[in-house]
Amino acid sequence: MTDRLGQYPALRKTARWLWALVLLTLPVTSFRYYPSFLGRATVSPLALIPLLPLLLIFLWLMFRQRRIWWPPHSVALAAFLLFAMLATALGFMDTPFTLRGQDYDSRALRAWLSLGMGLAFFLAAVLMNRDEADLRFSLKWLYIGLFLTIVWGGVQALAINTPILDRSLIDSWQEIFSRRGLVARRISGFAYEPSWLADQMVILYLPWLYAAALSGFRLTRFKWLEPFLILAVGALLLLTFSRSGLLNAVLVAGVVLLFTARSWGQRAWAWFRTQSYAVRGSLTGLLLLSLVAAFSWLSQYDYFARLWDFDVENGLVGYVVNISAGPRLAYSMAALETYAEHPWTGVGLGATGFYIYDRLPAWSLTTVPEIARQLNPDSNIFPNAKNLYARLLAEVGLIGFWLFIAFYFSLLGSVRKLWVQARPHLRYAAMAALFIWLAVALRNGTQDSLTFPVMWTALGIVLGLSQAADVREPDAEQ
């Protein structure tokens, strides 16, 4: 699609700058100045503003070409959308009662608008990343957005943990653009909450930085840039105190190293063995000191320290409740119970919340204060599944769930297609793509949003670049 924009130089330039603004503003997840008629959704990304005119450019180009463009290798996604429409339509036949002032129609409309917004980011990312020049352009603006996030996260850390900056002042600055101010003891960057900032680091930024360190592919001539940014991202992750974010980053980094860069690890080990005892001792000591410091820092926060406080007598459920994950487990179990009652087509996209309260496990009613507060008749909170896989099973049934999983595994095929290429930028992209694929898969076990622009943008870049792998190199035809 973008190659056709070459016929319109001014329009192509406009599209590239709009895409740059999308990437630059992605960290702002809950922009506070959207018109009131659009609702007060927590996920209201600032990047939607430059994204809309970018989509209009693509729609105009489709009109000129007299055809509707759809990403290749996305048949399963199209099938999922069609089946989700059927499941939603069938849900009207079993319309549940109104809950907290919301009815089935409004929740279904909200769910489809949210999914549509996520797909808009996905399609734009696919269209704007077709070759190495596009990749370098995207990375440049991702890095600029990351740099601004690092600076603002550092300012928040100083305000929260030191007397150097006035916390109330920084909190008021945060509320200039965000619907939420600072969070106690944890930094959130430009995002609504700390865990969202951790998701940005692990899914959007760290994959490209980590792949650069493993592959040697560089965006600039400055070899120190990616290592410096990796350290900065690690510091931000620690300051978020996000348990899932830190665990996902460590686990996925290990898997990517194992499957794509074992030779890198072997070379590093061989280099380490050739060094003097003093150098090896110093490096080992520095590593251990860093781990101890990170562990001590995290242990200061009770929310994190409870992870290693396991009481055998209370069992696994008691442990989950103790680490403040009880609500997530209870809502996921209620969603799965809803699926068991509607196994084939589910209850319709966006409708899980109507069924959750009546299907909560008994233990959650007496041991989880958050659920007790939400069951209060005065509460206006609409529940959700807290787990995308459980939500899909409940809302679109087993058929819709497997169609989505088929789409997701087709993206893994795109990762493999990138990996078998000889071109350095595609091999580099394959390492980052595998990191993204794994990180998103893990993240969706603790979140249930189908909007999540960071996820759709990162996956769209992967799919867009995989199309470049279908194009033969010039000398390959000779």
Image (tube, rainbow, N blue to C red):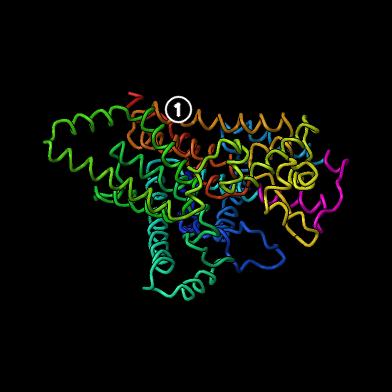
Residue closest to the eye, 450 or 218: 450
In the visual, does 128 lie left or right of 326?
left
The answer to if 335 sits in the magenta stretch is: no
Question: In this picture, which residue range is highlighted in magenta?
Answer: 90-115
Q: Which residue is drawn at 67% across and 68% down?
A: 35
Q: Nearer the viewer, residue 72 or 351?
A: 351
461 above or below 417? below
Count up the numbered dots: 1
Residue 321, by quadrant, is top right
Q: Among all residues in the image, which is located at the extreme top? A: 478
**Magenta stretch: helix, strand or loop mostly:** helix
- Left or right of 271? Residue 200 is right
Is residue 140 something one can see in this rendering? no
Residue 232, picture quadrant: bottom left
Q: Is 192 left or right of 417, judged from the image as shown?
A: right
Q: Position of residue 329 (x, y in %)?
A: 65, 41
Residue ID at (37%, 58%): 147
Q: Please give the residue where the numbered disc 1 appears in the rendered image.
A: 416
Q: Can residue 286 be seen in this view?
A: yes
Image quadrant of residue 374?
bottom right
Identify the amino acid type marked 1.
Arg
- Would residue 358 appear left or right of 276 to someone viewing this image? right
Q: Where is residue 323 in the image (x, y as percent from the top left)?
A: 56, 46
| Quarter containing the C terminus | top left
Instruction: Determine whether 440 is above or below 107 in the image.
Output: above
**Image location of residue 24, percent across then percent down:** 45, 58
Mark 1 surroundings: few (<14), some (14-19) or many (≥20) residues within 10 A: some
* Residue 101 forms part of the magenta stretch: yes
Of residues 368 and 17, the one drawn nearer to the viewer in this rendering: 368
Q: Picture coordinates of residue 273 (x, y %)?
A: 17, 30
